[in-house]
């Protein structure tokens, strides 16, 4: 029998996750809840791909009262995640929450405690953990190929960063780019570390996007430069966006000028993370880079690991340390071929959830993983604002 899936959020990422469940052939979307009925028409081509027409409802109780749902997906704006997920957990249902799990560490801690109390699984949509290149790095570290990791540097160059400044999280009050997008990479690093993050020290600025007075209240739909601007709304590679947007002018319009001066989130940042294990990681993100490239170096007592996680030729390379100025041949590790979003992680994660559900075993990134990602992002932003190191509060002792 197929797993039953419920969606909170009828379009966008929620509908896409529903489609991924459908594509496994072992799950089907049975009910979709949204406060906006027009969302159903936008997302229908995705969440109806299992050959079943799900119930579409604007009544939240219609969703929570169902007894044929194995997972409920929360695919709504970030600020709504905690409250919606809380109600799902208290209804005794497993929940898949799009990243970030919550908006604050305090909310995340509460959700972790509730999930344990009600005996349900919380899984967070940080799919990069399931990308074959990311998994290859993780396995090499688990196998002790470089010894105990001591130091790491991760460089995140993002050519699609302009699309983040076309949306509402160009503002800190809506989560900002770090919490909304950078959290994928923070979770990935946390997963490699397999340790609790304890402190962050961060700097950042808005060095390219935003801060241009002449762009105040400018939207692509009215702009004479829209056809030639490389950052215009029409260049966004998302048919769902274009079909559902650009919406009325305002916070959610999708075609804000990326240089509007009221944008206050950082487009470049440098974050130093300390872990309980002693590992220290430097994460740098540049959201106006001309290329997409995710590159990491990790050093341990037995050697080093160097990897490029994306692009046409991803690789993971181990170089052993032999001492006495002797050179040692580096070894390229095999990476399983992949395609699809998030480095192949999207569908692989959903398949893993289906398999784990069949075997009644837990799956990650779980609520605690989601908590650690939110904590690093929140306290990194505090550090950027304060200019000081920020100690991350420990998770509740029951976790």
Image (tube, helix red, strand yellow):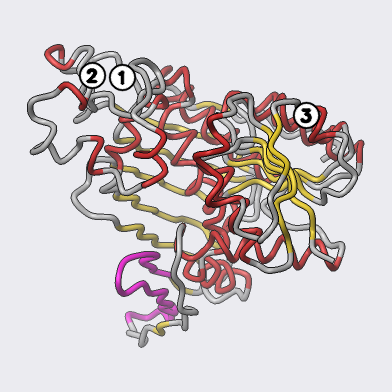
Q: Is residue 153 left or right of residue 119?
A: left
* Residues under numbered marks 3 and 2 in contact, where contact means CB atoms less than 8 Å apart: no
Q: Secondary structure at mark 2?
A: loop
Q: Which residue is mark 1?
A: 263
Q: Which residue is mark 3?
A: 86
How far apart, in angstroms, are the residues tagged by discs 3 and 2? Answer: 35 Å
Q: Quadrant of residue 105?
A: top right
Q: In front here: 223 or 146?
A: 223
Residue 136 higher or lower than 102, as above or below: below
Q: Where, quadrant-wise, is the C terminus in this rendering?
A: top right
**Is residue 179 in the magenta section?**
no
Estimate the x, y position of residue 224 in percent, counting from the top left. 8, 25
Crowdedness of circle 3 by 10 Å Cα count: few (<14), some, many (20+)? Answer: some
* Residues under numbered marks 1 and 2 in contact, where contact means CB atoms less than 8 Å apart: yes
**Which is nearer the N-term, disc 3 or disc 1?**
3
Estimate the x, y position of residue 361 in percent, counting from the top left. 84, 62
Magenta residues, start to end: 305-325
């Amino acid at each position: 029998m197929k797993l039953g899936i419920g969606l909170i959020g009828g379009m966008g990422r929620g509908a896409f996750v529903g489609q991924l469940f459908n594509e496994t052939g072992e799950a089907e979307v049975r009910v979709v809840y949204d406060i906006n009925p027009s969302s159903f028409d936008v997302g229908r081509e995705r969440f109806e791909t299992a050959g079943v027409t799900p119930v579409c409802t604007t009544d939240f109780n219609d969703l929570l009262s169902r007894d044929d749902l194995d997972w409920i997906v929360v695919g709504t704006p970030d600020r709504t995640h905690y409250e919606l997920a809380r109600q799902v957990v208290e209804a005794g249902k497993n929940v898949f929450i799009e990243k970030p799990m919550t908006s604050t560490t305090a909310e995340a801690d509460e959700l972790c405690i509730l999930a344990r109390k009600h005996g349900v699984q919380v899984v967070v949509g940080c799919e990069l953990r399931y990308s074959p290149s990311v998994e290859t790095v993780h396995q090499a570290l688990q196998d002790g190929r470089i010894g105990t990791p001591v130091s790491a540097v991760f460089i995140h160059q993002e050519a699609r960063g302009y699309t983040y400044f076309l949306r509402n999280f160009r503002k800190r009050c809506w989560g900002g780019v770090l919490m909304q997008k950078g959290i994928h990479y923070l979770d990935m690093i946390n997963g490699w570390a397999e340790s609790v993050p304890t402190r962050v020290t961060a700097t950042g600025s808005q060095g390219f996007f935003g801060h241009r007075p002449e762009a105040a209240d400018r939207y692509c739909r009215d702009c004479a430069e829209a056809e030639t601007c490389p950052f215009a709304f029409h260049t966004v590679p998302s048919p769902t966006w274009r079909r559902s947007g650009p919406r009325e002018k305002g916070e959610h319009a999708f075609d804000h000028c990326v240089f509007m001066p009221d944008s206050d989130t950082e487009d470049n940042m440098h974050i130093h993370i300390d872990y309980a294990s002693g590992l220290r990681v430097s994460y740098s993100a540049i959201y106006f880079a001309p290329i997409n490239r995710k590159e990491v170096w990790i050093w341990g007592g037995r050697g080093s690991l160097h990897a490029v996680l994306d692009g046409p030729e991803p690789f993971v390379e181990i170089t052993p340390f032999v001492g006495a100025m002797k050179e040692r041949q580096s070894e390229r590790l095999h990476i399983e071929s992949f395609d699809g979003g998030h480095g192949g992680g999207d569908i692989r994660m959903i398949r893993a959830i289906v398999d784990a559900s069949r075997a009644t075993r837990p799956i990650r990134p779980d609520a605690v993983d989601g908590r650690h990602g939110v904590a690093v992002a929140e306290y990194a932003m505090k550090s950027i604002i304060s200019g000081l190191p920020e100690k991350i509060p420990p998770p509740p002792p029951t976790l």
